[in-house]
Amino acid sequence: MPITTGVRPIADSRGGILMPNATPWDERDRRRSSPARTARAALARRLYAAPRLMPRLLKILEGEIIPRLLLAHRPVSGTKDLNGAAHGAVEAHDVTAFVRLLLGPDVTAAAGYIHTMRARGLSLEQVYLDLLAPAARLLGKMWDEDLRSFADVASGLFRMRQLLHEFSPTFVNESDCADHGQRVLLVPLPGEHHTFGLVMVGEFFRRAGWDVWDMFPDSTAELRALARSQWFSVIGLSLSSQTRIRELAPIIRSVRDASRNPTVRVMIGGQPFIERADLVAAVGADGSSSDARCAAIEAKKLLAARENRV
């Protein structure tokens, strides 16, 4: 029986762990000559050639393999008190220390570190934006540079998802916003695996009083079905790689056409749109946001602008 945690697949935020978004595996690994790297590249190419296998693999990793590994390595001793977080700020060394704990044998240590930082005056918003998000990027860099194995990085990302889930009620309750009846659908482009940031965006929407549906469709047809299933005020799509930008415009048109809400607002997020804001209009989206904190604010502005035009 798979272990359910209420969180999404563990390798999502990295994306490039199994399917890097810029450099093909064969090109990258020509520059890496060790037998282990060659074997890893061969496995990755097989996975890349069978995209339908990827979601099943991630579900197995999240639901069965990694939880068992974590439980098997759970230490007897409790969480250590850590001294690394500066009062009121997150420094680079804090991120490094946190990642070290994520990759360590004590599954409770990373949560203890967050509690220590909170006790020193940091809000959960600071923890999310200045600690967890950079930690996800650092884990990705470690994989990219062969500093850590796939198992290490995957278990670290899994623990990050657990932490988001654990702190979510407190984070949502930090805000005074009441439920305002607006519903948002947050989805990655089908085939995307960079979704840790999208899950965090969902936390900020919940905190602002939205009814959040964060889903992971396997196809455009499934995405259309989701858009038809409920009345969504906003649909947010995320994309991590510029190589797939051309796919967005027809997908956005298709989603608008299928949406139960004829005036649905479509937002787009991801690194390509942070680097080039002009792409937002080019793909037919209504807006974008540079970070998780601003996404709900931008969505509210889009809805207000729509009401003003009516």
Image (cartoon, rainbow, N blue to C red):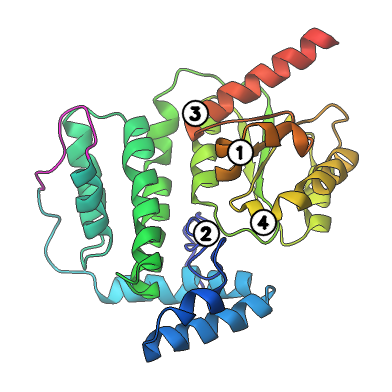
How far is mark 1 from mark 2, CA to CA?
19 Å
Q: Nearer the viewer, mark 2 or mark 4?
A: 4
Residue drawn at (33%, 32%) of the image: 126
Residue 24: percent from left, percent from top: 57, 71
Amino acid bearing label 3: Arg
Name the residue that disc number 1 marks.
273
Amino acid bearing label 2: Asp
- Read off the magenta span: 82-91
Label 4: few (<14), some (14–19) or many (≥20) C-alpha neighbours in 10 Å: few
Amino acid bearing label 1: Phe
Secondary structure of residue under mark 4: helix
> Residue 90 magenta-drawn?
yes
Residue 278: percent from left, percent from top: 68, 32
Q: Which mark is residue 12?
A: 2
Residue drawn at (56%, 68%) of the image: 19
First of labels 3, 4 by sequence position: 3
Displayed quadrant of residue 183? top right
Q: Nearer the viewer, mark 3 or mark 4?
A: 4
Residue 166 left/right relative to 57: left
How far is mark 3 from mark 2, CA to CA?
22 Å
Residue drawn at (55%, 19%) of the image: 178
Name the residue that disc number 3 marks.
207
